Amino acid sequence: MHNNPPETGAFYPRDLDWHPPAYTPGYKTSVLRSPQKAKISFDPSLGEISGPTFGHNMLGELDNDLVLNYAQPGESAIGERIIVHGRVQDERGRGVAGTLVEFWQANAGGRYRHKKDTYLAPLDPNFGGCGRAITDADGYYSFRTIKPGPYPWPNGVNDWRPSHIHFSIFGTGFAQRLITQMYFEGDPHIAICPIVNTIRDQAAIGQLIAPLDMNNSIPMDSRAYKFDITLRGRRSTMFENRKEGN
Amino acid sequence: MQPLDFLKESPSQTAGPYVHIGCVPTFAGVEGVYPEDLGKTMITGDAKGEKITLKGRVIDGSGTPLRDAMIEIWQADANGLFNSPVERRGTADPAFTGWGRQGADGDTGVYTFETVKPGRVPFPDGRLQAPHITMWIVARGINIGLMTRCYFEDEAEANAEDPILARVEHKVRIPTLMAKRDGDTYTFDIYLQGDNETIFFDV
């Protein structure tokens, strides 16, 4: 990490029109799980400006390698081998260094290793489906996995999720906390997915679609997809008089 | 005119039904990838302050508890200090992380945290806030993580001075933010909808 002192400014307000609203009847589960009363807004205080941090020493050697981190010795997960990499940055374009990024996904057949997933595609005995990384000094992360398969889900009669990877990102303050999903360039399911379409702005949806990145693909081994993630920006504290201290 | 060239925050998507695989894999039965689920242990030594259990459920508009929710909490230590580089007022208790993460139980929907009761933290204007725990809830059907605060019903004097509670126009809703005490256990149920809908915050 750079040796700059940690920033202590409050976050830019969230653009709630850019995010999906709570109530999205096309995604049926949201109907009974969406708050209906107005949220109460306030400028972040210390408890939202601060957040937990995690050290690189927490990571295991295979944490960012889903091809191997659940596989038996000498074996590997089945599927299209891919590398997902990118930069965690904030709304000012600054890299977010040293932040934890977690990811989870279905296997190549579209099945999750979860007792409540009963899809008829088989489990892969060498694929667990979770991993994590911590960004470097410039905000970069990368991991290796297999491309997850699309799968049907009970919403409409015949709804299918596009291939996707779930992401959880911490940032440097708890109010930056974000969970989202990454989609793959060219997937025809993106346009017709009720979960994708909880987001109303096509440009916002585009922000979640990772392009194929042949520059970082490894010949005869793995293709790469590039996925940058943007978190809320922080105000400068230079002109703020905070009695709790800057 | 120059462009105001800020980037846009990545839009949120639901954590989905299998968030436990990604965030609490051992709890979800995906064992051996990590030594322990992150956030499972908040008290890592001889932590200062009162040890408490915080438990509750996240309940949907039909009254059914969510069994696929994940709850994270973030709080000050017993002296009101955060275990974070952003904390500049002092050094937080090294035996307390301040951050916890738990999955709702797959049968009952109950979440449980073993933590300490937080101290009071000043608001930016200097007024003291009442002891509280910031909570973040994600699940299938929740399109963007919900942030709320758990206060303590037995802190009436501090609660009466709290600048955030003071901002709540409809005082009848304040009890939705109050954990109820029984011995060393506080219970805090989160209602996503209905007459008792929990107050959620846009911070």
Image (spheres, rainbow, N blue to C red):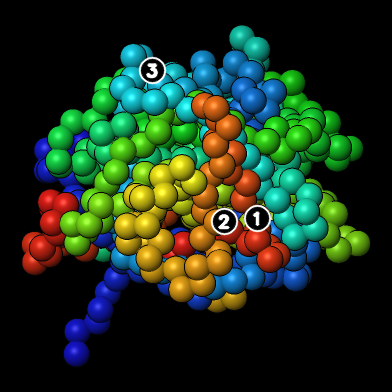
Which residue occupies 39% across, 53% down?
Answer: B159
Q: Nearer the viewer, mark 2 or mark 1?
A: 2
Tell me the quarter of the picture where residue A14 sits. bottom left
Question: Which element carries disc 1, helix, strand or loop?
Answer: strand
In-front residue for pair A150/A213? A150
For marks 2 and 3, the one nearer the N-term is 3
For marks 2 and 1, the one nearer the N-term is 2
Residue A112 spot, x, y in % from top left: 73, 36
In-front residue for pair B90/A100? B90
Which residue occupies 60% across, 16% down?
Answer: B32
Amino acid type, residue under disc 3 in the picture:
Thr
Q: Name the subunit of mark 3.
A: B
State if disc 1 and disc 2 touch (CB < 8 Å).
yes
Q: Could you say which disc has been placed on residue B191 in the image?
A: 1
Quadrant of the frame with the C terminus of chain B: bottom left
Q: Could you say which disc has been placed on residue B176 in the image?
A: 2
Q: Nearer the viewer, mark 2 or mark 3?
A: 2
Measure the alpha-carbon separation of dots 2 and 1.
8 Å
